[in-house]
Image: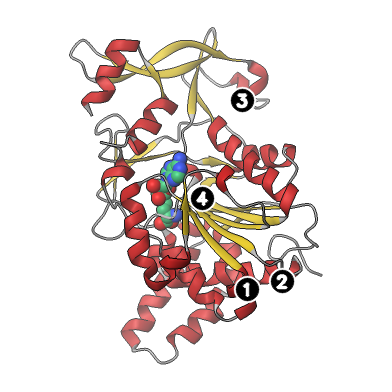
Amino acid sequence: MAKIAARIRAGGPISIADYMAQCLLDPDHGYYATRDPFGAAGDFITAPEISQLFGEIIGVWLIYTWRQAGRPAPFTLCEMGPGRGTLMADVLRTARIDPDFAAAARPVLIEASARLRTVQSETLGDDARRVRWIDRLDQLDQAPLFLVANEFFDALPVRQFIKTDQGWHERVIGLTDTDALTFLVGPAILPRSQVPQGDDHAPDGTIFEIAPTREAVAAQIAEHLAQHGGLALAIDYGHHQTSVGDTLQAVKDHAFAHPLAEPGLADLTSHVDFAALAASAEKAGAQALPTITQSQFLLQNGIVERAGVLGAEKTPQEQDAIQSAIERLCGDKRDQMGQLFKVLALVGPALPRPIAPFEATG
Ligand code: SAH
C-alpha cells in the first residue's frame, strides 16, 4: 500500500499498532474494507464458517444466561466484528426455540467495514430488517447487553516492544534505502514495571506486546455491563496469561505471510492476552470469569449431542462432515482450534452465579 510508505516518508516510522489499523481498516485499501476474506475461497476460515453448530451452541448459551439474568426485556443482542454475519444468523435462528428471548432481543452489529455490512445483510436475509448497524459501543442503547465477539479482539491493534540492553524499546516500521518496509527500534520505552515479572530478564531481541485498544474496548463493555447488566463473550486465538513473544501474524490464501510483505492484502492479527483483557474489564466494574478453552466451552455446552440431532436424518457423507467440523472446532491437541482458542466471559455484577461452563454449578 503506497499510502503507508508515503506516510512514513512524511512523518517518520509508525508503530505496529498504526500499521495494523491502517492495513486492516483503511477505507480505500484496508483488508476488511476491500474484501470478504472468509471461507474456502478466501484467506482463512473462522469457527462460524466451519459449522452452524458453533453459532447454535452460543445461541443456546445466551438463552441460558439471559434466563439466569431474570429475562430482561428488551435487551441488546450485540456482535462485534461479525465478518460474514454467519454467527448472528445462527444465533437468531436458534433464538426461536425461546420465543420470549427472540422477542426481547434487539440485534445490533458493530462493524467497521461498509463492504462487510452488505455481506452481513445478505447472510441475515429477513432478519436483517431487525438488525441495527453501529460503529462504536457508545452508540448502544442504555439496556442490558448480551454481547459476542469471535475473532474480533485479535484484529484490534497491538504495540510491540523489543528488549535491548537499554530496556524495552517500541518496535516501529520504517523504510529501507530502497523504500521497502522494515522493522526498526524506535525511541519510546516501556517501563520495566509493565513487563511481567521474570520476563524482564528475557534475552535481547525478545518481543513483548501490549494492546491498549483491546483493553479500552474491554473496559467500555465492562462499564456498560456494570451499569445496565448482562454479559459478554469473547472468543479468540490467545493465551490465558500475559507473556512475552512475537505473535503478529499475516495470513493470505490459508498460509502465513510476512506481516510487512503485502499491507492491506493479507489478514493481520496477534494473539489475545486474555489476562490483560480480564484485568481491564474488572477495573471497569465487570467480573471476568475464569478463561476456558473453546473445546471446553463447546463440549460442555453439548455440541456433540447437538451434532447427533443435526445428523440424525442426514446422509453418511453429511454425518462425516458434521463429525469433522466437531473435530476441527474442539480438537484438543496443542496446535488445534479447541486449545488455541480461549473463551472469556465478562458479567455484570447483578448476574446470579454460578455460570456454567465457566463455573461449576455443583
Ligand atoms: N467474527 C467473524 C469475523 C472475524 S474477522 C468470524 O468469526 O467469522 C474481524 C471482523 O471485525 C471483521 O468483520 C472486521 O471488519 C471487523 N473489525 C475489525 N476491526 C474493527 C473495528 N475496529 N471496529 C469494528 N469492526 C472491526
Residue 35 percent coordinates (x, y): 26, 48
Q: Residues within 10 Å of mark 1 (few under 14, many from 20)?
A: many
Q: CA distance from mark 4 to mark 1?
A: 26 Å
Asked which quadrant contains residue 270, the reply is top left
Q: Is residue 270 above or below residue 111?
A: above
Disc 1 and disc 3 in contact, CB within 8 angstroms = no
Q: CA distance from mark 4 to mark 2?
A: 26 Å
Image mark for residue 199: 3
Q: Earlier in the sequence, mark 4 or mark 2?
A: 2
Q: Earlier in the sequence, mark 3 or mark 4?
A: 3
Q: Residues within 10 Å of mark 4 (few under 14, many from 20)?
A: many
Image mark for residue 101: 1
Disc 1 and disc 2 in contact, CB within 8 angstroms = yes
Residue at x 59% of width, y 33% of height:
243
Residue 318 percent coordinates (x, y): 34, 82
Q: CA distance from mark 2 to mark 3?
A: 43 Å
Q: Earlier in the sequence, mark 4 or mark 1?
A: 1
Q: Earlier in the sequence, mark 2 or mark 3?
A: 2
Residue 265 percent coordinates (x, y): 25, 39
Residue mark closest to the camera, 1 vs 2: 1
Image mark for residue 67: 2
Q: Residues within 10 Å of mark 3 (few under 14, many from 20)?
A: some
Image mark for residue 236: 4
